[in-house]
Amino acid sequence: MKTLSKIYMALVLMFLYVPIFVLIVFSFNETKSRSVFSGFTLEWYAKLFRNEVIISSLVNTIIIAVTASIAATVLGTLAAIGINSMRKFPKAVVMNITNMPIVNPEIVTGVSLMLLFVFFAARMNLEFGFVTLVIAHITFDVPYVILNVMPKFRQMDPNLFEAAQDLGCGPFTALRKVILPEIMPGVVSGFLMSFTFSLDDFVISYFTSGSTSQTLPITIYSMTRRKISPEINALSTMIFVVVVIVLVVKNLIETRQERILRANGGDEQ
Amino acid sequence: MKKYLRTACVALCALALTGCAAGSPAEGTADSAEATEEAEAQTLTVEDMDYYTRFRGQDISINVYNWGEYISTGADEGTLNVNAEFTRLTGIKVNYTNYATNEELYAKLKGGGANYDVIIPSDYMISKMIKEDMLQPLDMDNIPNFKYIMPTFVDPAYDPENAYSVPYTWGTVGIIYNTSMIDIPREDIDWDILWNPDYADQILMFDNPRDAFAIAEIMMGYSLNTEDPVELSAAANKLKEQKSVVQAYVMDEIFDKMAANDAWLAPYYAGDALTILEDNEDLDFAVPKSGTNLFVDAMCIPAGAKQKEAAEMYINFMCEPDIAYANIDYICYSTPHSAAYEMLDEETRNNPVSYPGDEYLDENTTIFVNLSDEANLQMQTLWTEMKSAEADSPNRWIVPVFLLLCLALIVFTLIRRHVKKKKDIY
């Protein structure tokens, strides 16, 4: 039974990581072939850094993701604070409305945003590009932030806010010093989630990008007429490595803090 | 709480670092690449400096919309970064974005909102756009380098008076075949080999109706631009006959399948065929003598362009011999530019894959022009019919089976809930 479970585990991990492994291996392939490995080279990495088209769309993608997820985090957190103090029925209604974009197929969101922007483009001299992309990304990011922050309110003692005011806090100070720290884990995970969603969004960006700015997924897609260049393998490998490092560092910090916390707890007892 | 702040900070720093890492070396290498270029003989020389410098200091930018991987980016050492060179020479900033299909380009232009100054559609899309007034006539006085365009490509069928387009690249459609499996001399290979039952299940076919129909139409002696419903259905029947020997209908998977010997025969575009040939020395490419499709991608200015003169300057710049050579060297398609052609090495110039000769081009090839909406629709319908008409296809069962499963699941949950409720009551 134990070996069986181990095999099962190995299978699951294989399904998850073999594709990434293949991608990494072929980023070092000498030729452009995606099926025959003919020799080791770092040439694609060197080419990647000289390829302005890929690099500029990567920089674009990161700038858009950071801007959109920060804006969405602020908007979403404020919205969550508001929604939390609503009465039951309006709360349910508003929550359903905010959840709509998550359930809604991306393509519907994309097309409707495009139509909206076209409508304004004609009237307000709005040009498709960076601005439309950021607005579109904020739009689909906000629900994820709200969804992440709301549970923190449910876990929080509802009397904390009043208690803080009893002890002399103004409403704003109470929000800043008491409420915000309580919901912070939700805010952070909301931010990270919307950041990742912005980073790899294709469908919505496809409809809302324009003549001045395009994101990395669109650049990669546009290569499909010719052949997707191994430079993309190199780039994906680097992104994967960075993500792994961030995760490892995060876990290390967390375990260390937990150990300190436990040690302190032990002292008190 | 602090813990989360710190993780967030770490995450942000890491991202900022990747951003910087990605950003700064790129600039650094770009600069050094430029420096080496200047040191080497690769320096760009243009004929008329005054022409290019007249917009300097005016802070103009143009939006260029091109195919992906369809311009020299300077990624290969010692090559030119065309857009950066243009900015350096003229002071005009280039916003460069990419698309994957002609239809995508058309949709972006029709959708409104996006504003482009230079686009590079293919032949049939150009004639469609001309018909729909989506392009502006070019002022050829601003594009003196048009003189370099080879006579074969002047006044093409898709733009009969050559008022709207300047050809950028071209190519033919031919057959990639595996010489170790198919022992036929290159000259004898013709389209009917794709119907040969001896090679059943080793044949790949285009997965788009226009290119696939063209092959059938050549074999039956029809025009590649036929709109006759009878001829179109006959061509569709021809394709239906082929279906039993076809392994798969694919597009860019052809690259991998042919390189890995998963298939022996495939029709494809000449420029890309050269890339495939590099990966597998058993492969060769034949341009059938009975004729083929000649495709041309040409630079145009869309009707809404805001910087028409700067756009014309960009088109002229793309026709500078050095630039045209750098681009064609990167793309590997064939060039309609006489000076760039002269700069190619002899092997490429004499390669019948890329340059089958003017006589062949004039006599045996046809350029696509736009078909009427009815003909397009009919072709699309016939194509879908042809592809889906398979008796033992599992596809037909997927949808009803899936729906039944969903229904069963719903019924199951309802019953379970009902039973549970009853239990709760007692």
Image (spheres, grey):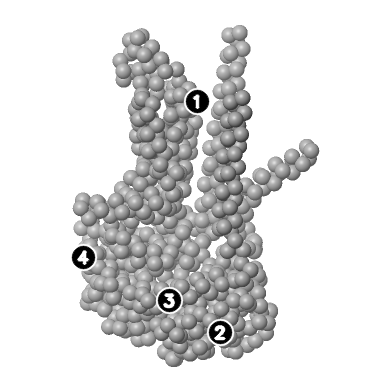
Q: Amino acid at mark 3?
A: Gln
Pick the residue in front: A72 or A26: A72
Cα separation between marks 3 and 4? 50 Å
In-image side of A193 versus B310 (left or right): right
User: From the viewer's perspective, is the residue at label 2 or at label 4 nearer?
Assistant: 2
The N terminus of chain A is located in which quarter? top right
Q: Is residue B245 above or below residue B104?
A: below
Q: Are marks 2 and 3 on the same chain?
A: yes
Q: Secondary structure at mark 3?
A: helix
> To which quarter of the image does residue B227 belong?
bottom left
Q: Earlier in the sequence, mark 3 or mark 4?
A: 4
Residue marked by disc 2: B191
User: From the viewer's perspective, is the residue at label 4 or at label 1 nearer?
Assistant: 1
In-image side of A35 versus B19 (left or right): right
Residue marked by disc 4: B54
Residue marked by disc 3: B378
User: From the viewer's perspective, is the residue at label 2 or at label 3 nearer?
Assistant: 3
Q: Amino acid at mark 4?
A: Arg
Cα separation between marks 4 and 1? 58 Å
- Please give the chain letter of the residue carrying mark 3: B
Q: Amino acid at mark 1?
A: Lys
Q: From the top left corner, tell me how far across and down residue B190 is, in percent.
A: 57, 86
Residue beneath the point at 36% across and 34% down: A94
